[in-house]
Amino acid sequence: MAAGAPAVWAARGDAGRPVGAVNLAFPDRAPTAATAGLAEPMVHRDTRGRGLGSAVPAAAEGAAAAAGSTLLHLDTETGGPAESLYRSAGWTRVGATPDYAADRPGVLRSTTLHFEQVPVRAVTREV
């Protein structure tokens, strides 16, 4: 996971079919080098309610922490199910941007920005 290069995780369901995914992007320059962004975390609607909504981003969050990130950010559709999922997982709402992206029928929707501080992992050394 080189700086500036995104990483992608996919969850596979029955018969190896993809049922969820998330991208993780690391900035390639200071002052944001310790920040990582989760992009497009998604779970197929047929598999919702099985814990994948938490498990898919958790894989990226763990990798971000291992890479030294101290802050994660993401955006979700305002009022959508993902917004409440991230709030219940401890993410902090920053604010909303109106008319940010169009949904499938082409209606502009607001997006809500969230952040999460990544716990610093203790570093141990063998003596």
Image (cartoon, helix red, strand yellow):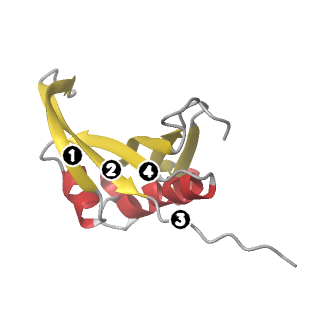
Q: Eyeballing the image, is 125 above or below 21? A: below
Residue 94, label in figure: 1
Camera-nearest label, 3 or 2: 3
Mark closest to the chain's N terminus, 2 or 1: 1
Going 61% across and 32% down the picture, which residue do you hit? 5
Q: Mark 3 points at which residue?
A: 120
Q: Tag 4's secondary structure?
A: strand
Q: Going from the N terminus, do you reach mark 1 or mark 3 first?
A: 1
**What residue type is disc 2 on?**
Phe
In the shown orientation, is residue 100 left or right of residue 86? left
Dividing the image into 4 quarters, which one contains the C terminus?
A: bottom right
In percent of width and height, residue 31 lies at 49, 34
Q: Is mark 2 on a helix, strand or loop?
A: strand
Residue 16 higher or lower than 122, as above or below? above
Query: How far separated are the C-alphas under marks 1 and 3?
Result: 22 Å
For mark 1, give the secondary structure: strand
For label 2, the residue is 115
Q: State the image quarter where residue 84 is shown.
A: bottom left
**Front-most of residues 16 and 29:** 29
Would you say the residues marked 4 and 2 are in contact, meaning their CB atoms lie under 8 Å apart? yes
Residue 10 horizontal/vertical position (percent): 53, 48
